[in-house]
Image: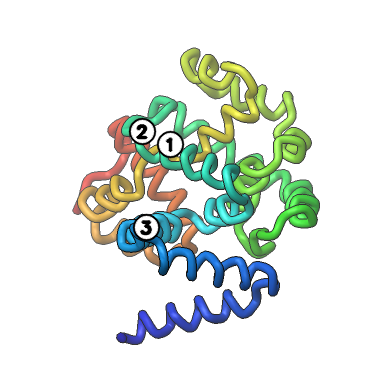
Amino acid sequence: MDLRQLNDLRARKSRFDKLPAAEKERLRQLHLALQSHSEKAQLEKIMLRYMDWLKSLDPLDQVVVLDKQGDERLGEVCRMRYQQSRQLTVLSPADNLEFIDWFRSVAETQKEAISEAVDRIGQRRRFRPEKSASPEALLRYVIATSDSETAKIVTPEVIGHLNSRLSARGREILEQGDSVRAIRMLITNPVSEFELRRFFEEKLSPMQRAELDRKEPDDMKRQIRRLYFSSQLGLAGERK
């Protein structure tokens, strides 16, 4: 066992020790049932694939999944997997840039309201993000977990500001049904992590990569997405 595996095992043990007694017992019973199941090997493969997928998610998306139980969690996993399977962005590259700028502006100007919403949501849920997370990350959490709290922040006036920045096709997408739910779908990044990583490694210059590596993880992701969509419009700088 190497150092990375040892640290991972210690982290798992620490998380298990913090669980309520009833949850610990539930996991022990699940383990016993798995060990005695006739298709144990296949089930273990499925569990490992699920854990690898879960670890690949943004930390706040992990919170959204882990906060749910049973069929509700399965439904959330299916929704996220469907989004990840899509190969094209819902909005055009130009509209994506406008959406990213709008989203960042809302997060920055509504910090206090977002923080209060996170507190209220946290009172009803087992998992909650760290308050030190970026305003954009906290806003994503609110939008992903509570329609009622989102409506207090993303008001019709705020949505109107977004509408004014989008193309006719972008407005049509946003106005299909519930605008809040449409925004929730848009913040579930439809560009795969693999595609963004390949763009980072193959399309950006060493100087651009070095500059991005110095940023905080959330800011780094946002900047890579911005550069990716800019590249679709021919706006990104060439490699040097």
Q: Nearer the viewer, mark 1 or mark 3?
A: 3
**On residue 83, which mark appears?**
1
Mark 2 or 3 closer to N-term? 3
Q: Report x, y in % for residue 49.
A: 35, 57
Pointers 1 and 3 in contact (CB under 8 A)? no
Q: Which residue is mark 3?
A: 43
| Relative depth, front residue between 40 and 195 | 40
Q: Residues within 10 Å of mark 2 (few under 14, many from 20)?
A: few
Residue displayed at 63% across by 24% down: 179
Identify which amino acid the numbered label 2 is placed on: Arg
**Circle 2 sits on which residue?**
86
- The residue depicted at 70 percent of the width and 59 percent of the height is 126
Q: Residues within 10 Å of mark 3 (few under 14, many from 20)?
A: some
User: In this picture, is 167 found above or below 97?
Assistant: above
Give how far apart the Cα atoms at labels 2 and 1 are.
Answer: 6 Å
Q: Amino acid at mark 3?
A: Leu
